[in-house]
Image (tube, rainbow, N blue to C red):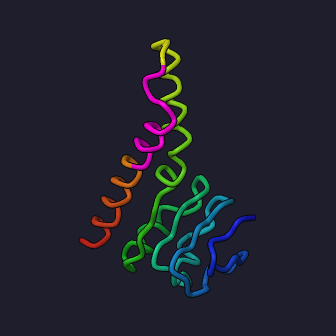
Amino acid sequence: MRTVPGSEVFSANLNSKCDALIITSGKKIVNSFNQDKIEAKIVVEGSDLAITYDGYKKLRNKGIIVVPDVLANSGKAIGIYLRWVNNRIGKVMFNEEETIRFLYEKINRTLREIINENKKT
């Protein structure tokens, strides 16, 4: 497992005070029964359906930024689509650098929109 320097890795401890809580496996990990315990500034739904709809609404109401699974996991799907475009056309339309730049720009823009939307609530 790789970690960011200065970060902590913990398991099944949703109530730890932290900057970012990244959920990497399991469904319905954050729900209406335990969302009150979360003290993170941002929650990243790194696995599919890790946060229930009720849990999501309550986190947002508390001012916690939530990055949904569809965004947190979108890089691979977008990359596959770009490869499909290249194969369909029969020539390379997007090289590796262009693909990475495209992914970065699209995902980054969407993340900024999520953060800005959270500031409005």
**Residue furthest out toward the top:** 90
Compared across the picture, whether 117 is left or right of 52 comes to left
Residue at left 51%, top 54%? 72
Q: Quadrant of the N terminus?
A: bottom right
The picture places residue 58, in percent across and down from the top left corner, at: 43, 74
Q: Nearer the viewer, residue 44 or 79?
A: 79
* Quarter of the rendering containing residue 117: bottom left
Q: Nearer the viewer, residue 88 or 121?
A: 88
Residue at left 37%, top 78%? 63
The picture places residue 91, in percent across and down from the top left corner, at: 48, 15
The picture places residue 69, in percent across and down from the top left corner, at: 52, 54
**Residue furthest out toward the right:** 1
Q: Quadrant of the C terminus?
A: bottom left
Residue at left 42%, top 75%? 64
Picture mark count? 0
Magenta-colored segment: predominant secondary structure: helix
Q: Nearer the viewer, residue 92 or 49?
A: 92
**Residue furthest out toward the left:** 120
Name above or below for residue 90 compared with residue 31.
above
Residue at left 71%, top 78%? 10
The picture places residue 22, in percent across and down from the top left corner, at: 58, 68
Task: Give the extent of the magenta segment.
Answer: 92-104
* Quarter of the rendering containing residue 4: bottom right
